[in-house]
Every structure is written in C-alpha cells, then in structure tokens.
C-alpha cells in the first residue's frame, strides 16, 4: 500500500465524511506549487479556495507568524493586546472604514455581518423588534452555519438541517427588478451579496448590476453587505471585486486570504453609525483579534500591496483566459472569469462525472483543481503566478483534454 492510500484510508476511517477530495495527499507547498507525500509536484489552481492568494508559505507571512508566536499568541479580548490597535488602524485605513470587528473564519464574519445588520435595523432604522428582514441572492454561498444556510438555495447546504432562520427573502442573482420588488418592504435591514459567485461556478452579474443594487439600498435605507471572503484581497484584479463596479458597501466581509492561508482570520468593516450599534457583551470571539492573527494579517495585506498582486492577477488572468480560449475542445462549453478567478464550464450535464474525471486527469499531469456544481471547474492559482507557469497550466489542461477525449 502506498503512503497516499494509507493516509486516505485513515481519513476515511476516522474522519467525518463531509468532503470528497481529489485523491492527492499534499504535504508541502511553496509559491504556486505543492508536493504530495510521494514527492510529485503540482501547480495549485485552487489556492485553498483563494485563501493562499499570496502563495503557499510566503516567507514574509511565515516570518510574521513565527516572530509573533515567540512573543504572544492569545490573551483574549478580556484584555488589550499590543498588536490589535495597530492592526485595526491599518485595516481601516486600507479599506476606508471607521471600524473593524475581527473574527476567525469567513462564516463567523458573515454571521457577524448579519447580526450587525439586524442590530442596526432595530436601533437606527426603527424596524419593529424581531421583524428585520435580510435579502440574499439565489446561488449564493456564504458558509454553512444554520443562519447562513437559511438564505441558501442549494439542496446540499439545506437538506435535513431545518428549521431555518425566519425573515429571509431570496431574489434572483443579477436581476435588479427582483430586488426592487422585495426591498420596498420597510422591514428590510440588509442585502447580502457576493460580487462574483465563486462556489456557484464563477457567476458574474451584468456590469451595472452591483452599482444598481447599491443605489437601490441607499434609496430604501437598507445596508449593502458585500461578502468578499473569496473574491477579495486582489483575487479579481483589484483589491476587492466590488471595486470593479465603483461601489463602496456599507458592510464589508473579509476572510481567507486575509491571513495568506496561514491561520483563520476574518473581519467585518463598517462605519461608526453601523458598527457602534453593537456594545460590549453583545458579540465576540475568544480568538477574534488575537495578536498572532493581527501580526499575520497585517503582513499578508502588505505582501499583496508591496508585490502588486492585484495587478498581477489582472494581467495573468487576461493571459490565462486568452490562452484557454485558443483551445478548441468539444468538452469546453464556456470559459469565464475575472482576474485569477476563472472557470471552465464543461459541456456535459451537472450530474455527470466528466468534470471530476477531467480533474483527475489534470492531477495526473501536474495540476490541481476541483469541480463545483458538477460540471464547472474553478481555476484560481495563487496571485504570485508568472507567465511561464500560466502557459504550463494551459498546456496541462490541453494535454488532459486531448487524453481524456481519446
């Protein structure tokens, strides 16, 4: 038995079966590459769902981690710590908000945004108690907590987990007329949206949609909540995906690449009028804002800025899509994306195994990716990728498609 098979069998026997991974056991990573336990090298084109935008084990981020770990890792928010205030100032200045509320996972940050939105709705908008409504879009993925899945339209997220959170409205993603009808209700407190739906298969709304949504929210005194957990921190060619639309959300949700993939760090940003609705004792987290996370996240953002990774994502993304579109394969239905958040939609039914089997072929040839929604392959390498590596990836995809067809 190979070491790969042994380790996979251990996971199968002792771990919950809530994931279905590609059968590769990764043991090391650096930059855009990872190595498995057998020593094989791969281009990573998933980037831990965009958590390692800065590349695997970026030396500056690892140094920030180890330097801080030798001094203080956790003290809890029962006391002040030496890193938190500087981190909060840095983040507020970078993203242009008065306040930040630090958390750990992306799902926790989304939950925080929902609570903050409701609190604002009662304290500032004057919505009657327990009647606040939050609007979500079809096809969304904001996490897997009970509150979040209440706004989901995916059976795999919702089935057998009810009852769900009440006072949720769902409108069609990309349809401004659908939002207009629902947002007129005086009890609507917020509208949460992904500027590009990553888990849904890199679904992008029309160019004017996000701006129209923002304007509609302002018109009806509703908070526009932007979930940038996957699309933020340079992934789409700008610091935030919403920047392409020239929109500033009322509440900004960040996670994943906020730590460069080193440890869970997330954040919610808003101005005083919203953020100060929450008072001491009303929300928190033992690990949220810990000094280790603050040091790592600060360095992770500095790396993105210093190395101009958003600009590189824009340039490399254009090259990647242009080269992919030169491939003429009947299995390719559509190539789409922005920056280095891209997808190949496979010309087969979602319930088929075609995309999965193609990803197995990618792995055989040295590239790691994984399907979403059955027939869509998400392709999102670390933002440090270079032109030569993009061309290598396209060659692997081309070779895999040809072999797969044969």
Image (tube, grey):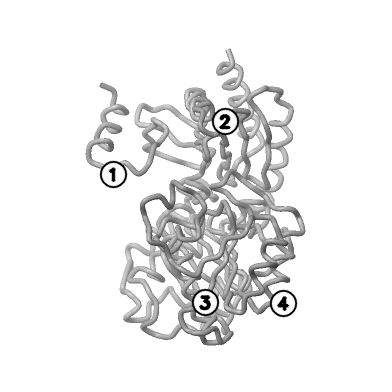
Work out how far the residue at label 3 is from the one at label 4, CA to CA, in angstroms.
18 Å
Is label 2 in a helix, a strand or a loop? loop
Q: Nearer the viewer, mark 1 or mark 4?
A: 4
Residue furthest to the right in view is 208
Sequence-wise first label, 3 or 1: 1
Q: Position of residue 77 (x, y in %)?
A: 35, 77
Work out how far the residue at label 1 is from the one at label 4, CA to CA, in angstroms.
46 Å
Residue indicated by mark 4: 219
Q: Residue at x 60, y 76 (%)?
A: 97
Sequence-wise first label, 3 or 2: 3
Residue indicated by mark 1: 16
Q: Position of residue 159 (x, y in %)?
A: 40, 50
Q: Is residue 161 above or below residue 44?
A: below
Work out how far the residue at label 4 is from the one at label 2, CA to CA, in angstroms.
41 Å
Is label 3 in a helix, a strand or a loop? loop
- Work out whether residue 117 or residue 253 is closer to the camera in this orientation and state it: 117
Sequence-wise first label, 1 or 4: 1
Q: Quadrant of residue 26?
A: top left
Q: Which mark is residue 349?
A: 2
Crowdedness near tag 3: few (<14), some (14–19) or many (≥20) residues, C-alpha within 10 Å: many
């Amino acid at each position: 038995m190979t070491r790969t098979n042994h380790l996979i069998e251990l996971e199968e026997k002792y771990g919950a079966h809530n994931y279905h991974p590609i059968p590769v056991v990764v043991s090391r990573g650096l930059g855009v590459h990872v190595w498995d336990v057998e020593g094989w090298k791969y281009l990573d084109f998933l980037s831990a769902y965009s958590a390692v935008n800065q590349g695997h084990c970026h030396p500056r981020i690892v140094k920030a981690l180890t330097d801080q770990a030798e001094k203080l890792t956790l003290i809890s928010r029962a006391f002040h710590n030496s890193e938190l205030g500087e981190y909060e100032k840095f983040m507020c200045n970078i993203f242009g908000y008065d306040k930040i509320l630090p958390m750990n996972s992306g799902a926790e940050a989304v939950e925080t945004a929902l609570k903050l939105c409701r609190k604002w709705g009662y304290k500032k908008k004057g919505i009657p108690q327990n009647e606040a409504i939050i609007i979500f879009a079809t096809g969304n993925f904001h996490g897997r907590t009970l509150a979040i899945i209440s706004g989901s339209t995916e059976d795999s997220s919702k089935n057998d987990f009810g009852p769900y959170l009440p006072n949720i409205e769902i409108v069609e993603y990309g349809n401004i007329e659908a939002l207009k009808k629902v947002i007129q209700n005086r009890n609507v407190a917020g509208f949460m949206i992904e500027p590009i739906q990553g888990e849904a298969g890199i679904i992008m709304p029309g160019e004017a949609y996000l701006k129209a949504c923002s304007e509609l929210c302002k018109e009806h005194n509703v908070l526009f909540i932007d979930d940038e957990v996957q699309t933020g921190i340079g992934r789409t060619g700008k610091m935030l995906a919403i920047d392409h639309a020239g929109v500033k959300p009322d509440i900004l949700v960040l996670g994943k690449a906020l730590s460069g993939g080193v440890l869970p760090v997330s954040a919610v940003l808003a101005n005083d009028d919203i953020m100060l609705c929450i008072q001491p004792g009303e929300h928190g987290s033992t690990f949220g804002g810990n000094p280790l996370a603050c040091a790592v996240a600060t360095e992770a953002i500095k790396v993105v800025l210093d190395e101009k990774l958003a600009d590189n994502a824009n340039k490399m993304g254009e090259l990647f899509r242009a080269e992919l579109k030169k491939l003429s394969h009947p299995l390719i239905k559509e190539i789409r994306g922005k920056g280095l958040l891209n997808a190949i939609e496979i010309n087969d039914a979602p319930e088929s195994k075609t995309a999965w089997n193609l990803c197995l072929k990618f792995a055989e040839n040295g590239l790691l990716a994984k399907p979403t929604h059955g027939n869509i392959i998400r392709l999102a390498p670390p933002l440090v990728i270079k032109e030569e590596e993009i061309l290598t990836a396209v060659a692997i995809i081309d070779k895999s498609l040809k072999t797969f067809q044969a």
